Amino acid sequence: MRKMKRELEEEEACKERKAEEEKKGPKARKNAKKEEKKEEEKKEEKKEEKKEEKKEEEKKEEKKEEKAPKARKNVKKEEKKEEKKEEEKKEEEKAPKARKNTKKEEKAPKARKNTKKEEEKKEEKKEEEKKEEKKEEKKDEEEEIEVEEMEYEGVKYLRSVKGIVYDIETSEEIGRWDGKRVIAE
């Protein structure tokens, strides 16, 4: 009985929408379609612009990373991962099709509902795994230190603002810079 009432209500709503569209006339419908197309084109252009901006940012970051120690590189990689995850979430939120299908899913047989529940469980598991990975990465993560490249006695080193000297290849602490020379510790 409930299904029949819902179906009748939906049919009546459709009839009302059609009647309203007929009252507006064909010009109004065409204008509405044109506006929708324009909006979609604008959205696509914005997406493309964002992608281009991200590519440019990534190129700039790669240039910076070439000079930075490994600790800094690890932090940059994690930031990129987080940005990608945030983008995926935003795209999922923007998906209008998923929202429109909810009315049809209410009428769907139980088998479809079960698959939906299974998918939700899988997504929850994936999210939990991602959280665990983040925790592990944070443990492994080294502290980001701002450094500059220097040369002493023909050997290149990295020097922090605090005067700590690091090996350029391994990023291991070697000693301190006293202004004239490296003091090993």
Image (cartoon, rainbow, N blue to C red):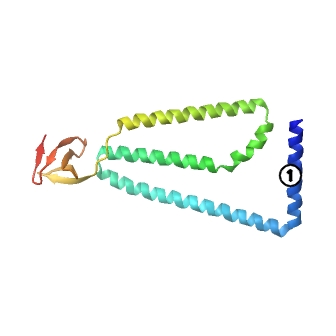
Callout 1: 10 Å neighbours few (<14), some, many (20+)?
A: few
Q: Nearer the viewer, residue 13 or 182?
A: 13
| Residue sitting at x 87%, y 37% | 2
Q: Quadrant of the C terminus?
A: top left
Q: Nearer the viewer, residue 97 or 128?
A: 128
Q: Which residue is mark 1?
A: 13
Quarter of the image holding residue 172? Answer: top left
| Residue sitting at x 89%, y 65% | 23
Q: Nearer the viewer, residue 39 or 93?
A: 93
Q: Quadrant of the N terminus?
A: top right
Quarter of the image holding residue 63? Answer: bottom left
Residue 55 placement (x, y as % from top left): 46, 56
Q: Is residue 59 left or right of residue 153?
A: right
| Residue sitting at x 47%, y 56% | 54
Is residue 112 depicted above or below 179 in this figure?
A: above
Residue 176 placement (x, y as % from top left): 15, 46
Q: Is residue 30 left or right of residue 37?
A: right
| Residue sitting at x 65%, y 63% | 41
Residue 127 placement (x, y as % from top left): 54, 36
Q: Is residue 145 left or right of residue 85?
A: left
Amino acid type at mark 1: Ala
Q: Is residue 98 left or right of residue 82?
A: right
